[in-house]
Image: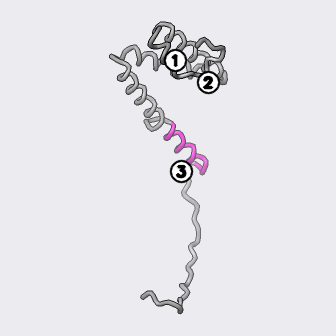
Amino acid sequence: MQEKNLTILDFDAAVELARKDPEAFERFRLDAIEALISKAPERTQLHLRRLQWRIEQVRKRSPNPTAACVKIHEMMWNSLAGQGGLNESLQKFCSSAHGENSPLPKARVLAFSRKKNTATNCD
């Protein structure tokens, strides 16, 4: 389990370590998280550390792992679809790309005459 590259997770080995030695698993988990954050671009590392701190606080305050998982899942969805989340940011970006509060472009609609089909009469 003690690999040099902690960003590659052997799930079965991690489960076995968690069963046999929870303290060693916790050290491995924290080392793997740190290795992953350290590989991120420097400009995002502080954000990732803050996010990880929030996740750890949810885990500490939750009565059990399932409750923690549900809370972290809610955090994820809020960051995606909640106020100020990714979805809202993308909407703002798209609207600003077309000009702030600018109306949609206008187009002239052309009328085409229908061509009568003499081979079959569907009336």
Q: Position of residue 75 (x, y in %)?
A: 43, 28
Q: In the orientation shown, which residue stands out farthest toward the left?
A: 63
Q: Nearer the viewer, mark 2 or mark 1?
A: 1
> Which residue, given by chain and number where applicable, does mark 3 sit on?
101
Alpha carbons under labels 3 and 2: distance apart? 31 Å
Please state if 105 lies on the left or on the right of 15 as rendered: right
Q: Position of residue 82 (x, y in %)?
A: 43, 36
Q: Nearer the viewer, mark 1 or mark 3?
A: 1
> Which residue, given by chain and number where applicable, does mark 2 sit on?
44
Residue at horizontal 55 percent and vertical 18 percent from the top: 49
Q: Mark 2 or 1 closer to N-term?
A: 1
Marks 3 and 2 close (CB-CB < 8 Å): no
Q: Which mark is residue 14?
A: 1
Quarter of the image holding residue 81? Answer: top left
Circle 2 SS class: helix
The residue closer to the viewer here, 39 or 110, is 39
Q: Mark 1 or 3 closer to N-term?
A: 1
Q: Residues within 10 Å of mark 2 (few under 14, many from 20)?
A: few
The residue closer to the viewer here, 121 or 47, is 121
Image quadrant where one finds the N terminus: top right
Circle 3 SS class: loop
Extent of the magenta region: 86-99
Residue at horizontal 48 percent and vertical 18 percent from the top: 15
Q: In the orientation shown, which residue stands out farthest toward the bottom?
A: 118
Q: Nearer the viewer, mark 3 or mark 2?
A: 2
Image quadrant where one finds the C terminus: bottom left
Badge 1 amino acid: Ala
Residue 87 colored in magenta in the image: yes
Q: Position of residue 30 (x, y in %)?
A: 54, 13
